[in-house]
């Protein structure tokens, strides 16, 4: 499975816009950091998209193709950011 390229990221742009509203830094398009540590990036596999999110020490992979999957992904991101604020 390869990292998401420009065409895939174009299709994910509405999700990227939502992620840019969070307390994250986008070091390169579709690659988000929390502080100096990589936090989230995307992969593509055919017509499917996946997000790797660092919720603990390692990345966990979540589906990010459908609107429902993207909403669930944003909820995971928000929960992780709230947890970090404590």
Image (spheres, grey):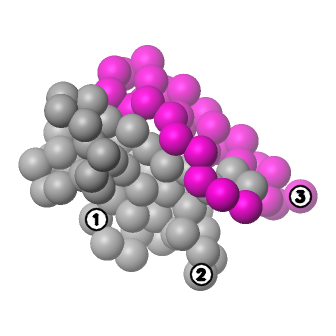
The magenta region covers: 57-86
Position of residue 44 measured from the top left corner of the image (x, y, whole percent): 26, 42
Count neighbours of disc 1 (C-alpha within 10 A) and say few if under 14, some if 14 to 19, many if 20 or more. Answer: some
67 left or right of 7?
A: right
Vertical placement of 66 versus 44: above or below?
A: above
| Residue in front for this viewpoint, 68 or 2 | 2
Instruction: State the residue position of label 3.
Output: 86
Q: Residues within 10 Å of mark 3 (few under 14, many from 20)?
A: few
Name the quarter where the C terminus is drawn. Answer: bottom right
Q: In the figure, residue 84 lies in which quadrant?
A: bottom right
Residue at position x 59%, y 53% from top?
59
Q: CA distance from mark 1 to mark 3?
A: 28 Å
Which mark, by number, is residue 29? 1
Q: On residue 18, which mark appears?
A: none
Q: Position of residue 34 (x, y in %)?
A: 60, 69
Q: Secondary structure at mark 1?
A: loop
Q: Alpha-carbon neighbours of circle 2 within 10 Å: few (<14), some, or many (≥20)?
A: few
Magenta: main secondary structure: helix
Q: Looking at the image, is mark 1 or mark 3 earlier in the sequence? A: 1
- Residue 36: quarter of image: bottom right
Q: CA distance from mark 2 to mark 1?
A: 16 Å
Residue 33: x, y in percent? 52, 69
Q: Is residue 42 magenta?
A: no
Q: Earlier in the sequence, mark 2 or mark 3?
A: 2
Does residue 21 appear in the picture of this structure? no
Are circles 2 and 3 on residues that touch, CB within 8 Å? no
Q: Nearer the viewer, mark 1 or mark 3?
A: 1
């Amino acid at each position: 499975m390869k990292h998401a390229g420009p065409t895939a990221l174009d299709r994910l742009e509405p999700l990227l816009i939502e992620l840019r509203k969070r307390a994250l830094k986008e070091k390169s398009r579709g690659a988000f950091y929390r502080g100096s540590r990589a936090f989230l990036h995307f992969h593509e596999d055919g017509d499917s998209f996946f997000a790797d999110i660092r919720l603990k020490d390692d990345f966990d992979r979540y589906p990010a193709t459908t609107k429902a999957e993207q909403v669930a992904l944003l909820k995971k991101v928000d929960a992780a950011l709230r947890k970090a604020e404590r």
